[in-house]
Amino acid sequence: MQACDEDPALHLEFLANYIAELSLLEYSLLSYSPSLIAASAIFLARFVLQPTKYPWNSTLAHYTQYKRSELSECVKTLHRLSSVGPGSNLPSITEKYSQHKKEAPRHSTKGAATVAARKGDEPESGKDWSEMWRRSTSPKVKYSSATTVHRNSIDR
């Protein structure tokens, strides 16, 4: 097993770094502050790795100083950028992460941007987060040695 698989925090860091690094060469992301991109990359990585778990919490909001609703547009942009997959115009970033031979998850993140855009910054009280997501999206998790996170379009 890879060290990345043995340590969920390392897997989260790896995926968030990958998503954030994709943003470095994207002109449309220049309008977002680096801290907003970092927070949005963490949000998206947390959603990808644990789609049935609420991806944002009060601790993250406190330390990043961003509410989930403030991440919405940036999460959507990062999602579109990272959805391109193999053959994108950013092969050097993909190659860089593939050299580490870390397992990258391949998930559907169809609901990631929807979560960020929902009103309110906490899950609806009295509702189980995972049950709420089962109704809105049904992500299937597969692991491969590909470094690109494959996603369905959020616009479907």
Image (cartoon, rainbow, N blue to C red):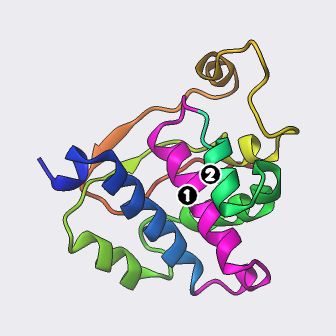
Image position, residue 13 (x, y; %): 40, 61
Give the number of the disc on residue 42.
1
Image position, residue 12 (x, y; %): 41, 54
Image position, residue 66 (x, y; %): 75, 59
Residue 137 is left or right of residue 22, and the answer is right
According to the picture, the residue beneath numbered tag 2 turns out to be 60
Please report the bounds of the magenta region as a residue range.
25-53
Q: Give yes or no for residue 43 being in the magenta stretch.
A: yes
Residue at screen point 53% across, 35% down: 51
Whether residue 148 is visible? no
- The answer for how far apart the CA atoms under marks 2 and 1 are is 9 Å
Q: Tell me the chief SS of the magenta region.
A: helix
> What is the three-letter code of the residue carrying label 2?
Leu
Residue at screen point 55% across, 58% down: 42
Q: Which secondary structure, mark 2?
A: helix
Label 1 CA crowd tier, 10 Å (few <14, some 14–19, many 20+):
many
Tell which residue pokes out farthest to the top in this image: 126
Residue at screen point 69% across, 52% down: 61
Q: Are marks 2 and 1 in contact (CB under 8 Å)?
A: yes
Q: Nearer the viewer, mark 2 or mark 1?
A: 2
Q: Give yes or no for residue 105 being in the magenta stretch.
A: no
Quarter where residue 147 is shown = bottom left
Image position of 92 with respect to 156: above or below: below
Say which of 115 and 148 sits in front: 115
Image position of 144 with respect to 73: above or below: above
Residue 28 is left or right of residue 3, and the answer is right
> What is the three-letter code of the residue carrying label 1?
Ile
Quarter where residue 127 is shown = top right
Upstream in sequence: badge 2 or badge 1: 1
